Image (cartoon, rainbow, N blue to C red):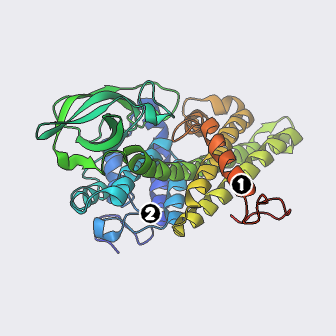
């Protein structure tokens, strides 16, 4: 048991309790366009920021399955709330894997206890899914490192205390930590976007921002393939589980409405067309959960399977959330279109989930490539792996 206020032995139980407490507030955050600072403090006090970090760094040592379940609880209530946990975990995971001993000691406890709110600054106007095309410069200038560029769609960019920035140094991908208080950091709040309206999103300018060399993370050349890739892999996993929570919440709200909304002498649930919508949404939600569980298991084993299984899970879960949101709005009808409707909010947010951390179309290419490697890689005798008719082992 941690001495931190509100921390329970199980991060999943903590997340479930927090989600129940804030459920009725989430619509207000979405309408007002921002998760309040007090809520970020609640999440931090509950020990849910970077919960999978080892206890030596202030984390809860959560397993991948526990991290996933807690994101499902939060995602079922508010995608921005889950997004806070996601981006904090992305930066923490990258530092834990690739940071120096001094960087881990300096930054990780402050990320875990919420002293610092993190932002992952990778996306640019001409570099969304293709992050190798970023043009931000992170270059040495005397005793300093200078960061110059503009990043877009940064989750919690309005309030982030530190950004993990992806850039280039002489054509080599490089990453650096840039504190939000430094001269030259400018923020342009994004409002009234399609989804994730409470996630305090901003476009962030780095105008010749000077940082010490100790803020560079990993050697130049490893910024994308190692540091950013670790962050994105972590992000896909938590987004996938958040989508499971969204899909299951939509099924719950649609089923509850269908069972109680009367039309003449019958309730909606008596109509076969409504039952068909519910059935499809329930199947997709269950399938997404199963794939997320499979990804959690693969990640627990520290094998290379964790990466493709995570891509697969995120793809399926985003698709399930989008479908469940669409069908739930259809079943609820006008009630689903009301300003504070949870299914309407999930419907909008789910479209964003199909884009972030790798768009669905990009994920399809990765999944297909993995499938081809599984079934067509030559065996020692020169025959394709799938030629004998048996299924290749995962």
For the residue pair 93 and 49, the one nearer the viewer reads as 93
Residue that carries the numbered disc 2 in the rendered image = 14
The residue furthest left is 143
User: For residue 152, what is the image quadrant?
Assistant: top left
The residue furthest bottom is 1
Identity of the residue drawn at 48% across and 35% down:
196
Tell me the tag on residue 361. none
Q: CA distance from mark 2 to mark 1?
A: 25 Å
Rendering coords of residue 350 (x, y %):
59, 38
Q: Dot 1: few (<14), some (14–19), or many (≥20) neighbours within 10 Å? A: some
Left or right: where 170 falls relative to 87: left
Q: How many callouts does the rendering have?
A: 2
Q: Dot 2: few (<14), some (14–19), or many (≥20) neighbours within 10 Å? A: some
For the residue pair 37 and 152, the one nearer the viewer reads as 152
For the residue pair 307 and 223, the one nearer the viewer reads as 223
Of marks 2 and 1, which one's residue comes earlier in the chain?
2
Residue that carries the numbered disc 1 in the rendered image = 287
102 in relation to 174, above or below: below
74 in relation to 209, above or below: below
236 in relation to 51, above or below: above
Residue 4 seen in the figure: no
Quadrant for the C terminus in the image: bottom right
Identity of the residue drawn at 59% across and 47% down:
243
Left or right: where 264 falls relative to 303: right
| Disc 1 element | helix
Residue 229 seen in the figure: yes
Rendering coords of residue 124 (x, y %):
41, 28
| Disc 2 element | helix
Q: Nearer the viewer, mark 2 or mark 1?
A: 1
Rendering coords of residue 10 (x, y %):
45, 69
Rendering coords of residue 138 (x, y %):
27, 36
Quadrant for the N terminus in the image: bottom left
């Amino acid at each position: 048991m941690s001495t931190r206020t509100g921390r329970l032995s199980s991060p999943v139980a903590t997340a479930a309790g927090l989600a129940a407490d804030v459920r009725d507030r989430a619509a207000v955050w979405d309408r007002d366009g921002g998760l309040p600072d007090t809520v970020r403090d609640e999440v931090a006090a509950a020990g849910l920021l970077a919960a999978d970090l080892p206890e030596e760094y202030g984390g809860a040592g959560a397993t991948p399955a526990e991290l996933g379940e807690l994101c499902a609880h939060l995602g079922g209530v508010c995608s921005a709330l889950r997004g806070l946990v996601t981006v904090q975990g992305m930066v923490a995971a990258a530092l834990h894997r690739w940071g120096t001993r001094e960087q881990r000691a300096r930054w990780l406890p402050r990320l875990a206890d919420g002293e610092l709110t993190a932002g992952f600054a990778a996306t640019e106007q001409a570099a969304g899914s293709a992050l190798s095309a970023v043009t931000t410069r992170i270059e040495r200038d005397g005793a300093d490192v200078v960061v110059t560029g503009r990043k877009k769609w940064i989750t919690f960019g309005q309030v982030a205390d530190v950004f993990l920035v992806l850039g280039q140094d002489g054509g080599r991908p490089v990453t650096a930590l840039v504190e939000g208080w430094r001269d030259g950091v400018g923020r342009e709040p994004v409002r009234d976007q399609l989804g994730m309206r409470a996630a305090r999103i901003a476009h962030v300018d780095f105008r010749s921002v000077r940082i010490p060399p100790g803020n560079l993370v990993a050697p130049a050349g490893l910024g994308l393939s190692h540091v950013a890739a670790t962050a994105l892999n972590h992000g896909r996993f938590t987004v996938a589980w958040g989508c499971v929570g969204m899909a299951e919440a939509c099924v719950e709200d649609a089923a509850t409405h269908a069972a109680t909304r009367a039309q003449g002498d019958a309730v909606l649930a008596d109509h076969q067309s409504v039952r068909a919508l519910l059935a499809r949404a329930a199947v997709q939600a269950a399938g997404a959960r199963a794939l997320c569980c499979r990804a959690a298991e693969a990640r627990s084993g520290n094998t290379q399977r964790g990466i493709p299984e995570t891509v697969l899970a995120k793809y399926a879960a985003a698709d399930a959330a989008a479908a469940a949101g669409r069908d739930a709005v259809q079943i609820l009808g006008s009630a689903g279109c009301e300003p504070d409707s949870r299914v309407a909010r999930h419907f909008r947010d789910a479209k964003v989930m199909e884009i972030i951390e790798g768009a669905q179309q990009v994920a399809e290419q990765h999944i297909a490539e993995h499938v081809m490697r599984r079934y067509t890689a030559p065996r020692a005798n020169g025959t394709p792996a799938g030629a004998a008719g048996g299924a290749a082992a995962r």
